Image (tube, helix red, strand yellow):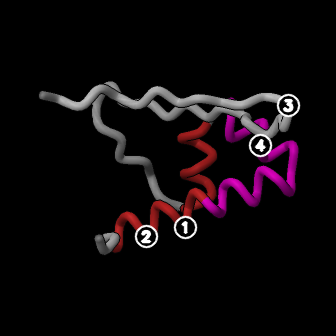
Amino acid sequence: MELTTAQKQAAQLIQTLIKASWKSKKFKRKLIKSPVKTIEKVTGKKSKLPEGVKIEVEDQSDPSIIYFNIPIKPKS
């Protein structure tokens, strides 16, 4: 399956945010506290999240913890 341009751009942005978080504890704190504002600052673009949707950033960098993400239940 081929990724769309938007999916490729999103993946690249995620990698940029991860690398910046690894490089700077200050950046990581800002991303966790205010993800939308931090992403807008990185991209230089206003966020266009749908009404009622938020971004939550979880610091999963502790190697002694295994995180398990439960995704949204698919519609039948």
Instruction: Rate crowding at label 1 as few (under 14), some (14 to 19) or many (20 or more) other CA atoms within 10 Å.
Output: few
Residue 21 lies in the magenta-colored region: yes
Q: Is residue 36 left or right of residue 6?
A: right
What kind of residue is marked 2?
Lys
Foreground mark, 3 or 1, reads: 3
Residue denoted by label 1: 12
Residue 40 lies in the magenta-colored region: no
Tag 3–tag 1 contact (CB < 8 Å): no
Where disc 2 sits, the SS reads: helix
Tag 3–tag 4 contact (CB < 8 Å): no
Q: Which mark is residue 62?
A: none
In whole angstroms, how far apart are the C-alphas of marks 3 and 1? Answer: 27 Å
Q: Residue at x 50, y 34 (%)?
A: 55
Q: Residue at x 55, y 67 (%)?
A: 12
What kind of residue is marked 1?
Gln
Q: Earlier in the sequence, mark 3 or mark 4?
A: 4
Q: Which mark is residue 64?
A: 3
Foreground mark, 2 or 3, reads: 3
